Amino acid sequence: MSKKSLIKIFILIIALPHLGLLGQQELYMPRNIQSAYEEGTRSFNGMPGDNYWQNSSDYKIKVEVDPQENLLTGSEEITYYNNSPDTLTRIVIRLYQDILKKGGARDWSLPSDGVHDGVQISKVIIAGKEVDMEDRKNFNRSGTNLLITLNEVLHPNSQLYLSIDWNVYISDKVKIRMGAYDSTSFFIAYWYPQVAVYDDIDGWDRYNYSGQQEFYNDFSNFDVEIKVPNTFAVWGAGELQNPEELLNEKYLVRYNLAHQSEDVVRIVKEEDLTEGNIFNNLNEFNTWKYKADYVTDFPFALSDHYLWDGVSVIADSTTDRKVFVDAAYKIESEDFYDVANISKKSIQYFSFEMPGVPFPYPCLTAFNGSGGMEFPMMINDGSASTLAGTVGVTSHEIAHTYFPFYMGINESKYAFMDEGWAVMLPFKFQERMVDENYPRRRNVGSYQRFAGNETEMPPMIPSVLLKGHSYRTAAYSRPGIAYDFLREVLGDDLFTEALQEFIKQWNGKHPLPYD
């Protein structure tokens, strides 16, 4: 059988919603996706169409975190760019933390003390006019979405200016990708009112966030100022703009050294936390300023008692471009002391081996929280009990830099284009880093437990419709081993060449499985 035939079989197995369609000559294509090809925003050669477009936003956010009250208070100014050919009559704002709102729909039951009043909005201004938030017809909160009817329509190739003031409680009882890990350590994610995606497939993305499924965001620019008590460090997506205003001299020297050093620098050690005087204490509060350009989200974390390591790694040999890698972690962690180094080696592997594309961002922070969760330029991982576990979760979450973030994947619909790649890409790295480590075998075993069961669903079914084992099988193990099978069929060179071409054509955009 030819490689071309095997590839067709692979595509059919991974993609088709119904096995009965295997006998057809062409792949089934839903009509909303057909429409995009007819309109020329997509093309059948796998490249963006001549009429491809996507919208974006610029965010300027000022936020204050009160650790004593577990309260985040923010104000943001948003410039929204309508690059579509459509005239928009409303705008959709995501309020992700409404997942914890009393009475909200969620994928899991929560303790009564784990819910709160959701995102508290005090003011919305659009195009210079304050919005009447009591007008339920034109200001409608639905699930985790806020739908606002515009007084004046937003024409194609024009901009909309809006500002929002809000606050939200940071839960220490429920930590669904965000929360308080102790009284003075927090990871802040999906925390700001965010303009939803408007695209060429579905128009406004209005899927509610219920906990299990992940996200779909536009590429935007972020200018964020984070005000915290002067004993706290803040780690955020993007590059810190004012370290000299925040770090006292000894720590500023270490911080700058870490940006150049190929060996891990202990920026803040245990004895430093005991001595104190790490940060500027001229004022009661410090403001940490971060910028992140053309990314899909902005998370941050803070603590007054975390250790801090940093190291530099070359990610592009043609330009010698360096990536700053740091790790912030609990003193009692038994594995995170090596996570900066593991992260460095992961970035080298992804940049030069698989997928062999230079790490696309200037920095990456690994924060020692819980579980394993990815964000642009940040990962939030719990401590693992084995080296294989630490290497596995670290490399998996860093792999997400490419899928979904660099590639703009719609995770809420196509988790297999996100998690499946993050499973497969680091296989060889994970085996190399730990003796007798068999990630391929584990994923095959995971898939075998549910393969052929009536709960096994094709990965092409929108992920937001899947739950439990059906979701995890379709998102992780099945596509992960399918991608690896395709690599074996094509051979490393051809597979890598094809993957690199896909990344080249679609990075910074929103590819579909059909692309």
Image (spheres, rainbow, N blue to C red):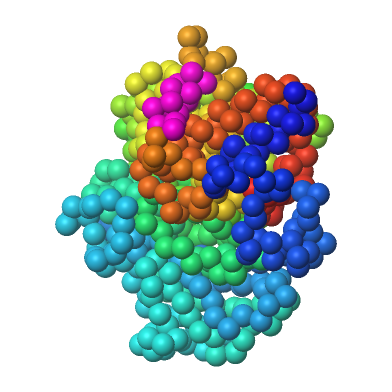
Q: Residue 466's x, y, as percent?
A: 42, 49
Q: Residue 229's x, y, as percent?
A: 36, 54
Residue 278 appears in the figure: no
Q: Given the current orientation, which residue lies at the most extreme top position?
A: 435
Q: Given the current orientation, which residue lies at the most extreme left position?
A: 112
Between 442 and 232, the residue placed more toward the observer is 442
Image quarter (top left, top right, bottom left or bottom right) of the N terminus: top right
Query: What's the residue at 72%, 42% (across, down)?
Result: 503
Between 486 and 333, the residue placed more toward the observer is 486
Work out whether 379 lies above or below 212.
Answer: above
Work out whether 6 lies above or below 160.
Answer: above
Query: What's the residue at 55%, 35% (across, down)?
Result: 479
What is the chief secondary structure element of the magenta stretch? helix
Query: What's the residue at 74%, 42% (across, down)?
Result: 502
Residue 234 as seen in the image, left or right of residue 383: right
Residue 290 as seen in the image, left or right of residue 233: right
Q: Residue 402's x, y, as percent?
A: 63, 41
The residue stretch that appears in magenta: 440-452
Residue 106 appears in the figure: yes
Between 10 and 72, the residue placed more toward the observer is 10
Q: Is residue 233 magenta?
A: no
| Image mark count | 0
Between 1 and 206, the residue placed more toward the observer is 1
Quadrant housing residue 317: top right
Query: What's the residue at 65%, 60% (across, down)?
Result: 33
Quadrant housing residue 442: top left
Q: Residue 90's x, y, as percent?
A: 54, 81
